[in-house]
Protein backbone atom coordinates (compact mmCIF):
# COMPACT_ATOMS: atom_id res chain seq x y z
CA UNK A 1 0.00 0.00 0.00
CA UNK A 2 1.48 3.35 -0.98
CA UNK A 3 1.14 6.18 1.50
CA UNK A 4 0.25 8.75 -1.19
CA UNK A 5 -3.17 10.11 -0.33
CA UNK A 6 -4.02 6.96 1.67
CA UNK A 7 -6.38 8.05 4.42
CA UNK A 8 -6.24 6.25 7.76
CA UNK A 9 -8.92 6.63 10.44
CA UNK A 10 -7.72 6.28 14.05
CA UNK A 11 -10.41 5.94 16.74
CA UNK A 12 -9.49 7.16 20.22
CA UNK A 13 -6.69 9.25 18.72
CA UNK A 14 -5.85 11.04 21.98
CA UNK A 15 -4.90 7.82 23.83
CA UNK A 16 -1.41 6.78 25.00
CA UNK A 17 -0.81 4.27 22.18
CA UNK A 18 -2.82 6.20 19.59
CA UNK A 19 -0.73 9.38 19.87
CA UNK A 20 2.36 7.37 18.89
CA UNK A 21 0.38 5.76 16.05
CA UNK A 22 -0.79 9.15 14.74
CA UNK A 23 2.79 10.43 14.87
CA UNK A 24 4.15 7.40 12.99
CA UNK A 25 1.39 7.65 10.36
CA UNK A 26 2.06 11.35 9.72
CA UNK A 27 5.82 10.72 9.51
CA UNK A 28 5.14 7.98 6.94
CA UNK A 29 3.07 10.39 4.82
CA UNK A 30 -0.46 9.12 5.48
CA UNK A 31 -3.51 11.39 5.74
CA UNK A 32 -4.95 10.85 9.22
CA UNK A 33 -8.48 11.39 10.50
CA UNK A 34 -8.70 10.83 14.24
CA UNK A 35 -11.60 10.71 16.68
CA UNK A 36 -11.68 12.08 20.22
CA UNK A 37 -14.37 12.53 22.84
CA UNK A 38 -14.62 16.33 22.89
CA UNK A 39 -13.73 19.50 21.00
CA UNK A 40 -11.30 20.42 23.77
CA UNK A 41 -9.43 17.08 23.47
CA UNK A 42 -9.43 17.29 19.69
CA UNK A 43 -8.15 20.87 19.62
CA UNK A 44 -5.39 19.80 22.00
CA UNK A 45 -4.45 16.97 19.64
CA UNK A 46 -4.22 19.28 16.62
CA UNK A 47 -2.12 21.73 18.64
CA UNK A 48 0.29 18.97 19.70
CA UNK A 49 0.91 18.11 16.05
CA UNK A 50 1.28 21.79 15.12
CA UNK A 51 -1.93 21.70 13.07
CA UNK A 52 -0.32 19.25 10.64
CA UNK A 53 -1.97 19.64 7.22
CA UNK A 54 -2.55 15.86 6.96
CA UNK A 55 -4.35 15.59 10.32
CA UNK A 56 -8.00 16.27 11.10
CA UNK A 57 -10.16 15.14 14.04
CA UNK A 58 -13.84 14.33 14.51
CA UNK A 59 -15.83 14.11 17.75
CA UNK A 60 -17.14 10.70 18.83
CA UNK A 61 -18.51 11.42 22.30
CA UNK A 62 -19.26 7.88 23.40
CA UNK A 63 -17.95 4.83 21.54
CA UNK A 64 -20.54 2.63 23.29
CA UNK A 65 -23.49 4.59 21.88
CA UNK A 66 -25.40 2.88 19.07
CA UNK A 67 -24.16 4.14 15.68
CA UNK A 68 -21.33 6.02 17.42
CA UNK A 69 -19.19 6.15 14.28
CA UNK A 70 -21.93 6.64 11.66
CA UNK A 71 -21.46 10.40 11.26
CA UNK A 72 -17.69 10.07 10.75
CA UNK A 73 -18.11 7.41 8.07
CA UNK A 74 -21.02 9.23 6.41
CA UNK A 75 -18.73 12.22 6.07
CA UNK A 76 -15.38 10.56 5.25
CA UNK A 77 -16.16 6.93 4.39
CA UNK A 78 -15.50 7.29 0.67
CA UNK A 79 -11.88 8.23 1.25
CA UNK A 80 -10.89 6.06 4.26
CA UNK A 81 -8.84 3.02 3.23
CA UNK A 82 -7.52 1.91 6.60
CA UNK A 83 -9.20 1.87 10.01
CA UNK A 84 -7.19 1.53 13.23
CA UNK A 85 -9.60 1.01 16.12
CA UNK A 86 -7.65 1.85 19.28
CA UNK A 87 -10.51 3.26 21.39
CA UNK A 88 -11.55 1.06 24.32
CA UNK A 89 -12.06 1.70 28.04
CA UNK A 90 -9.00 0.81 30.16
CA UNK A 91 -9.32 1.58 33.86
CA UNK A 92 -10.23 -0.28 37.02
CA UNK A 93 -12.24 2.44 38.81
CA UNK A 94 -15.62 0.77 38.59
CA UNK A 95 -17.87 -1.83 40.16
CA UNK A 96 -20.40 -1.80 37.30
CA UNK A 97 -18.26 -3.96 35.06
CA UNK A 98 -20.83 -4.52 32.35
CA UNK A 99 -21.74 -0.85 31.96
CA UNK A 100 -18.24 0.61 32.21
CA UNK A 101 -15.99 -2.01 30.65
CA UNK A 102 -17.63 -4.93 28.86
CA UNK A 103 -20.47 -3.28 26.97
CA UNK A 104 -18.54 -0.20 25.73
CA UNK A 105 -15.65 -2.34 24.47
CA UNK A 106 -17.92 -4.71 22.55
CA UNK A 107 -20.35 -2.05 21.31
CA UNK A 108 -17.55 0.29 20.24
CA UNK A 109 -16.03 -2.45 18.11
CA UNK A 110 -19.37 -3.46 16.61
CA UNK A 111 -20.42 0.12 15.88
CA UNK A 112 -17.23 0.99 13.99
CA UNK A 113 -17.49 -2.19 11.89
CA UNK A 114 -21.18 -1.56 11.17
CA UNK A 115 -20.38 2.02 10.10
CA UNK A 116 -17.71 0.70 7.70
CA UNK A 117 -20.20 -1.80 6.25
CA UNK A 118 -22.89 0.89 5.90
CA UNK A 119 -20.85 3.79 4.50
CA UNK A 120 -17.43 2.53 3.39
CA UNK A 121 -17.89 -1.11 2.36
CA UNK A 122 -16.13 -0.50 -0.95
CA UNK A 123 -13.37 1.78 0.28
CA UNK A 124 -12.01 0.40 3.57
CA UNK A 125 -9.43 -2.27 2.74
CA UNK A 126 -7.77 -2.93 6.10
CA UNK A 127 -8.98 -2.88 9.69
CA UNK A 128 -6.62 -3.23 12.65
CA UNK A 129 -8.07 -3.57 16.13
CA UNK A 130 -6.04 -2.85 19.24
CA UNK A 131 -6.76 -5.88 21.37
CA UNK A 132 -4.58 -7.18 24.22
CA UNK A 133 -2.78 -10.17 25.68
CA UNK A 134 -5.78 -10.04 28.05
CA UNK A 135 -7.84 -11.54 25.20
CA UNK A 136 -5.47 -14.54 25.21
CA UNK A 137 -5.31 -15.39 28.91
CA UNK A 138 -7.27 -14.46 32.03
CA UNK A 139 -5.56 -13.05 35.16
CA UNK A 140 -5.81 -16.37 37.03
CA UNK A 141 -4.14 -18.38 34.28
CA UNK A 142 -1.47 -15.71 33.79
CA UNK A 143 0.27 -17.08 36.89
CA UNK A 144 0.26 -20.73 35.77
CA UNK A 145 3.88 -21.72 34.92
CA UNK A 146 2.77 -24.88 33.09
CA UNK A 147 0.65 -22.96 30.58
CA UNK A 148 1.98 -21.91 27.14
CA UNK A 149 0.20 -18.99 25.44
CA UNK A 150 0.48 -18.29 21.71
CA UNK A 151 -1.34 -16.42 18.92
CA UNK A 152 -4.01 -19.15 18.94
CA UNK A 153 -4.87 -18.82 22.67
CA UNK A 154 -8.07 -17.32 24.07
CA UNK A 155 -8.92 -16.08 27.58
CA UNK A 156 -11.23 -18.82 28.93
CA UNK A 157 -13.40 -16.52 31.09
CA UNK A 158 -17.10 -16.25 30.28
CA UNK A 159 -19.14 -13.01 30.30
CA UNK A 160 -20.25 -13.95 33.84
CA UNK A 161 -16.97 -15.26 35.27
CA UNK A 162 -14.95 -12.25 34.10
CA UNK A 163 -17.07 -10.01 36.34
CA UNK A 164 -15.31 -11.28 39.48
CA UNK A 165 -13.35 -7.99 39.73
CA UNK A 166 -12.30 -4.99 37.63
CA UNK A 167 -9.08 -6.52 36.30
CA UNK A 168 -10.84 -9.71 35.16
CA UNK A 169 -13.63 -7.60 33.64
CA UNK A 170 -11.14 -5.49 31.67
CA UNK A 171 -9.46 -8.67 30.41
CA UNK A 172 -12.87 -10.08 29.48
CA UNK A 173 -13.77 -6.86 27.66
CA UNK A 174 -10.75 -7.29 25.37
CA UNK A 175 -11.66 -10.92 24.64
CA UNK A 176 -15.32 -10.23 23.85
CA UNK A 177 -14.58 -7.13 21.76
CA UNK A 178 -12.02 -9.02 19.71
CA UNK A 179 -14.32 -12.04 19.30
CA UNK A 180 -17.08 -9.68 18.13
CA UNK A 181 -14.75 -8.33 15.42
CA UNK A 182 -13.79 -11.75 14.04
CA UNK A 183 -17.45 -12.85 14.13
CA UNK A 184 -18.58 -9.67 12.36
CA UNK A 185 -16.13 -10.28 9.53
CA UNK A 186 -17.21 -13.93 9.21
CA UNK A 187 -20.89 -12.95 9.01
CA UNK A 188 -20.35 -10.02 6.62
CA UNK A 189 -17.58 -11.35 4.37
CA UNK A 190 -19.67 -10.90 1.23
CA UNK A 191 -20.65 -7.29 1.94
CA UNK A 192 -17.28 -5.76 3.00
CA UNK A 193 -13.87 -5.89 1.35
CA UNK A 194 -11.57 -5.32 4.33
CA UNK A 195 -9.17 -7.79 5.92
CA UNK A 196 -8.81 -7.78 9.71
CA UNK A 197 -5.77 -7.98 11.98
CA UNK A 198 -5.50 -7.51 15.72
CA UNK A 199 -2.60 -6.16 17.75
CA UNK A 200 -2.43 -7.83 21.17
CA UNK A 201 0.10 -6.11 23.46
CA UNK A 202 1.02 -7.10 27.02
CA UNK A 203 1.75 -4.40 29.62
CA UNK A 204 2.64 -1.32 27.55
CA UNK A 205 5.51 0.77 28.91
CA UNK A 206 7.63 3.47 27.28
CA UNK A 207 7.58 7.25 27.10
CA UNK A 208 4.46 9.29 26.43
CA UNK A 209 4.43 10.84 22.94
CA UNK A 210 4.26 14.26 24.63
CA UNK A 211 5.91 14.53 28.05
CA UNK A 212 3.43 17.12 29.33
CA UNK A 213 0.57 14.62 29.12
CA UNK A 214 2.04 13.11 32.31
CA UNK A 215 0.61 16.13 34.14
CA UNK A 216 -2.92 14.86 33.38
CA UNK A 217 -2.39 11.35 34.71
CA UNK A 218 -0.80 8.27 33.22
CA UNK A 219 -1.76 5.14 31.29
CA UNK A 220 -2.52 2.14 33.50
CA UNK A 221 0.60 0.08 32.67
CA UNK A 222 3.07 2.95 33.11
CA UNK A 223 1.41 3.59 36.47
CA UNK A 224 3.37 0.54 37.69
CA UNK A 225 6.66 2.33 36.92
CA UNK A 226 5.36 5.58 38.45
CA UNK A 227 4.53 3.72 41.69
CA UNK A 228 8.09 2.41 41.90
CA UNK A 229 9.62 5.81 41.10
CA UNK A 230 7.56 7.25 43.98
CA UNK A 231 8.12 4.34 46.39
CA UNK A 232 9.92 4.84 49.71
CA UNK A 233 13.23 3.30 50.76
CA UNK A 234 12.50 0.10 52.66
CA UNK A 235 8.89 0.22 51.47
CA UNK A 236 6.85 -2.63 50.02
CA UNK A 237 5.48 -2.76 46.47
CA UNK A 238 3.17 -5.10 44.66
CA UNK A 239 5.21 -7.42 42.45
CA UNK A 240 3.17 -7.21 39.24
CA UNK A 241 4.20 -9.62 36.51
CA UNK A 242 3.31 -10.44 32.92
CA UNK A 243 4.53 -9.84 29.40
CA UNK A 244 5.63 -6.35 28.41
CA UNK A 245 6.16 -4.33 25.25
CA UNK A 246 7.28 -0.77 24.50
CA UNK A 247 4.64 1.65 23.20
CA UNK A 248 6.92 2.59 20.28
CA UNK A 249 6.86 -1.05 19.14
CA UNK A 250 3.07 -1.23 19.56
CA UNK A 251 2.70 1.79 17.32
CA UNK A 252 5.06 0.42 14.69
CA UNK A 253 3.15 -2.89 14.74
CA UNK A 254 -0.12 -1.09 13.90
CA UNK A 255 1.46 0.18 10.67
CA UNK A 256 3.04 -3.15 9.72
CA UNK A 257 -0.32 -4.85 10.48
CA UNK A 258 -1.95 -3.10 7.52
CA UNK A 259 1.11 -2.53 5.31
CA UNK A 260 2.25 -6.17 5.23
CA UNK A 261 -0.35 -8.32 3.40
CA UNK A 262 0.84 -11.38 5.35
CA UNK A 263 -0.60 -9.85 8.54
CA UNK A 264 -4.16 -10.02 7.18
CA UNK A 265 -6.26 -12.36 9.31
CA UNK A 266 -3.56 -12.55 11.99
CA UNK A 267 -3.45 -11.83 15.71
CA UNK A 268 -0.14 -10.11 16.45
CA UNK A 269 0.94 -10.86 20.02
CA UNK A 270 3.25 -8.10 21.20
CA UNK A 271 5.62 -9.23 23.92
CA UNK A 272 9.36 -8.80 24.28
CA UNK A 273 9.31 -11.18 27.25
CA UNK A 274 8.23 -11.43 30.86
CA UNK A 275 8.75 -8.73 33.44
CA UNK A 276 7.97 -8.24 37.11
CA UNK A 277 8.04 -5.12 39.29
CA UNK A 278 11.15 -6.44 41.02
CA UNK A 279 13.11 -6.34 37.75
CA UNK A 280 11.79 -2.83 37.08
CA UNK A 281 12.84 -1.57 40.53
CA UNK A 282 16.27 -3.20 40.09
CA UNK A 283 16.67 -1.25 36.83
CA UNK A 284 15.61 2.02 38.50
CA UNK A 285 18.09 1.56 41.35
CA UNK A 286 20.92 0.64 38.98
CA UNK A 287 20.30 3.27 36.29
CA UNK A 288 19.25 6.34 38.33
CA UNK A 289 21.79 7.38 40.98
CA UNK A 290 19.37 10.11 42.15
CA UNK A 291 16.81 7.44 43.15
CA UNK A 292 19.24 5.09 44.88
CA UNK A 293 18.63 4.95 48.61
CA UNK A 294 15.34 6.84 48.22
CA UNK A 295 13.12 4.19 46.64
CA UNK A 296 12.22 0.60 47.49
CA UNK A 297 14.65 -2.21 46.67
CA UNK A 298 12.61 -5.35 47.44
CA UNK A 299 14.83 -8.40 46.90
CA UNK A 300 17.31 -7.38 44.19
CA UNK A 301 17.98 -10.06 41.58
CA UNK A 302 15.03 -12.25 42.59
CA UNK A 303 12.92 -11.34 39.52
CA UNK A 304 13.80 -14.27 37.23
CA UNK A 305 13.13 -16.94 39.87
CA UNK A 306 9.83 -15.20 40.81
CA UNK A 307 8.73 -15.28 37.15
CA UNK A 308 9.78 -18.92 36.79
CA UNK A 309 7.31 -19.85 39.54
CA UNK A 310 4.57 -17.26 38.94
CA UNK A 311 4.07 -16.77 35.23
CA UNK A 312 2.81 -18.72 32.24
CA UNK A 313 5.04 -19.05 29.18
CA UNK A 314 4.56 -17.13 25.92
CA UNK A 315 5.48 -18.05 22.38
CA UNK A 316 4.96 -15.22 19.89
CA UNK A 317 7.62 -16.28 17.40
CA UNK A 318 5.02 -16.23 14.60
CA UNK A 319 4.28 -12.52 15.32
CA UNK A 320 7.96 -11.59 15.50
CA UNK A 321 8.53 -13.19 12.11
CA UNK A 322 5.57 -11.36 10.55
CA UNK A 323 6.56 -7.97 11.97
CA UNK A 324 10.24 -8.36 11.16
CA UNK A 325 11.62 -5.76 13.57
CA UNK A 326 13.39 -5.97 16.92
CA UNK A 327 11.50 -4.90 20.07
CA UNK A 328 12.87 -2.64 22.82
CA UNK A 329 14.29 -4.61 25.75
CA UNK A 330 13.01 -4.19 29.31
CA UNK A 331 15.91 -2.09 30.59
CA UNK A 332 15.66 0.52 27.80
CA UNK A 333 11.91 0.57 28.09
CA UNK A 334 11.98 1.20 31.89
CA UNK A 335 14.78 3.76 31.64
CA UNK A 336 13.01 5.77 28.91
CA UNK A 337 9.70 5.67 30.82
CA UNK A 338 11.24 6.75 34.14
CA UNK A 339 13.55 9.40 32.58
CA UNK A 340 10.56 11.19 31.14
CA UNK A 341 8.66 11.01 34.46
CA UNK A 342 11.64 12.42 36.36
CA UNK A 343 12.18 15.15 33.77
CA UNK A 344 8.55 16.26 34.10
CA UNK A 345 8.94 16.40 37.89
CA UNK A 346 12.20 18.35 37.47
CA UNK A 347 14.03 15.74 39.49
CA UNK A 348 16.80 15.24 36.99
Image (cartoon, rainbow, N blue to C red):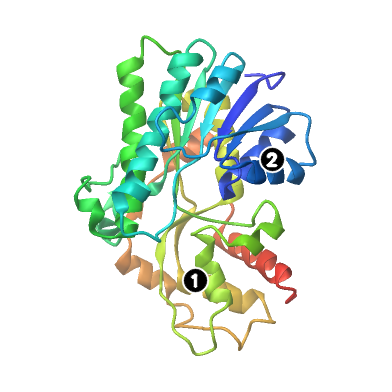
Residue 77, percent from left and from top: 56, 17
Near mark 2 (Cα within 10 A), the count class, few <14, some 14-19 or many ≥20, is some
Residue at label 2? 23
Q: Nearer the viewer, residue 39 or 273?
A: 39
Q: Are marks 2 and 1 in contact (CB under 8 Å)?
A: no
Q: Is residue 114 above or below residue 98?
A: above
Residue at label 1? 279
Foreground mark, 2 or 1, reads 2
Q: Secondary structure at mark 2?
A: helix
Which image quadrant is residue 106 in? top left
Q: Is residue 86 above or below residue 332?
A: above
Q: Quadrant of the C terminus?
A: bottom right
Q: Earlier in the sequence, mark 2 or mark 1?
A: 2
Which image quadrant is residue 13 in? top right
Q: Is residue 297 above or below residue 65?
A: below
- Number of numbered labels in the structure image: 2
Near mark 1 (Cα within 10 A), the count class, few <14, some 14-19 or many ≥20, is many
Can residue 135 be seen? no
Which image quadrant is residue 108 in? top left
Res. 148 mark: none
Q: Residue at x 34, y 66 (%)?
A: 308
Residue 341, percent from left and from top: 66, 67
Q: Residue at x 41, y 25 (%)?
A: 265
Q: In screen coordinates, is 330 left or right of 312?
A: right
Residue 28, percent from left and from top: 71, 31
Q: CA distance from mark 2 to mark 1?
A: 30 Å
Q: Secondary structure at mark 1?
A: helix
Can residue 24 be seen? yes
Amino acid sequence: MTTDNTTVFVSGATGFIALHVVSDLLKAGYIVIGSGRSKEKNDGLLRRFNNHPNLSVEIVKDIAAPNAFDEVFKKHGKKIKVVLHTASPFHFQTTDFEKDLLTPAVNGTKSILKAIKEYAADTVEKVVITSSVAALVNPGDMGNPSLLISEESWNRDTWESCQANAVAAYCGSKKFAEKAAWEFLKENKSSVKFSLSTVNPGYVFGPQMFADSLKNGINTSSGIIAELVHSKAGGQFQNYSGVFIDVRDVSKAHLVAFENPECAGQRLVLSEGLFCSQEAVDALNEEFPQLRGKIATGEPGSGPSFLEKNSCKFDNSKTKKLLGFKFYNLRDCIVDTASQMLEVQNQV
